[in-house]
C-alpha cells in the first residue's frame, strides 16, 4: 500500500502515541519532519523488539512520503506492522495518523519503511528466536 492510496483506517498495531508539543515545531506551528521520523523509528523498534525478544538496532529507513503537516497539539499515533522477518532482520511499515484536536478526525500524515536487526549484548547481529 502506498501512502498516496486512500485508506480510511490505520494499518498495523498501535505501537506509540504522543502529543505534538511546541518544542517539536517550526515557527509556523507544524511538527518538524525529523521529530516525526524519530517517533516512527521508536514505534518500529517497539514492534521489532517484541519479535526479536531483545535488543534491535535500526539499519535502514526506506521510502517516506509526508502527506500533510502535523500541527502542534495534535495527537500523533504510530501504527507498525512487520512486513518481512528474516534470519536476523525485521522490516516494518510504520504509518502515522493524527487526531485533529478541533474535530477528533483521524488523518494519515505519513508512512515509512524501517528495517531493524536483532543484536546481542555486544552489539553484534544475532539470529531471531
Image (cartoon, grey):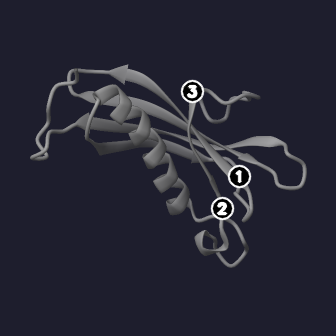
Q: What residue occupies the far bottom of the structure in this picture?
A: 27
- Mark found first going from the N terminus, 2 or 3: 3
Residue plotted at (14% across, 31% down):
126
115 horizontally vs 47: left or right: left
In-front residue for pair 123/91: 123
- Mark found first going from the N terminus, 3 or 1: 3
Image: 92 above or below 59: above
For disc 1, the marked residue is 75
CA gap, disc 3 and disc 1: 17 Å
29 horizontally vs 1: left or right: right
- Mark found first going from the N terminus, 2 or 1: 2
CA gap, disc 2 and disc 3: 21 Å
Contact, mark 2 vs mark 1 (Cβ under 8 Å)? yes
The disc label shown at residue 12, or none:
3
Which x, y percent locates residue 91?
37, 30
Residue plotted at (42% across, 39% down):
46
- Quarter holding the N terminus is top right
Judging from the image, what secondary structure is the residue with disc 2 in?
Answer: loop
For disc 2, the marked residue is 20
Residue plotted at (56% across, 29% down):
13
Which x, y percent locates residue 12?
57, 27
Which x, y percent locates residue 49?
34, 35
Judging from the image, what secondary structure is the residue with disc 1 in?
Answer: strand
Judging from the image, what secondary structure is the residue with disc 3 in?
Answer: loop
CA gap, disc 2 and disc 1: 6 Å
11 horizontally vs 118: left or right: right
Amino acid at each position: 500500500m502506498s501512502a498516496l492510496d486512500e485508506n480510511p483506517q490505520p494499518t498495523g498495531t498501535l505501537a506509540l502515541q504522543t502529543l505534538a508539543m511546541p518544542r517539536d515545531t517550526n515557527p509556523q506551528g507544524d511538527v518538524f519532519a525529523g521529530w516525526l521520523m524519530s517517533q516512527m523509528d521508536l514505534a518500529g523498534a517497539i514492534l521489532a523488539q517484541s519479535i526479536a525478544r531483545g535488543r534491535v538496532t535500526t539499519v535502514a529507513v526506506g521510502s517516506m512520503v509526508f502527506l500533510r503537516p502535523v500541527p502542534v497539539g495534535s495527537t500523533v499515533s504510530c501504527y507498525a506492522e512487520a512486513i518481512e522477518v528474516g534470519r536476523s532482520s525485521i522490516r516494518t511499515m510504520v504509518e502515522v495518523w493524527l487526531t485533529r484536536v478541533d474535530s477528533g478526525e483521524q488523518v494519515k500524515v505519513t508512512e515509512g519503511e524501517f528495517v531493524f536487526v536483532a543484536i546481542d549484548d555486544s552489539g553484534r547481529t544475532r539470529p531471531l528466536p
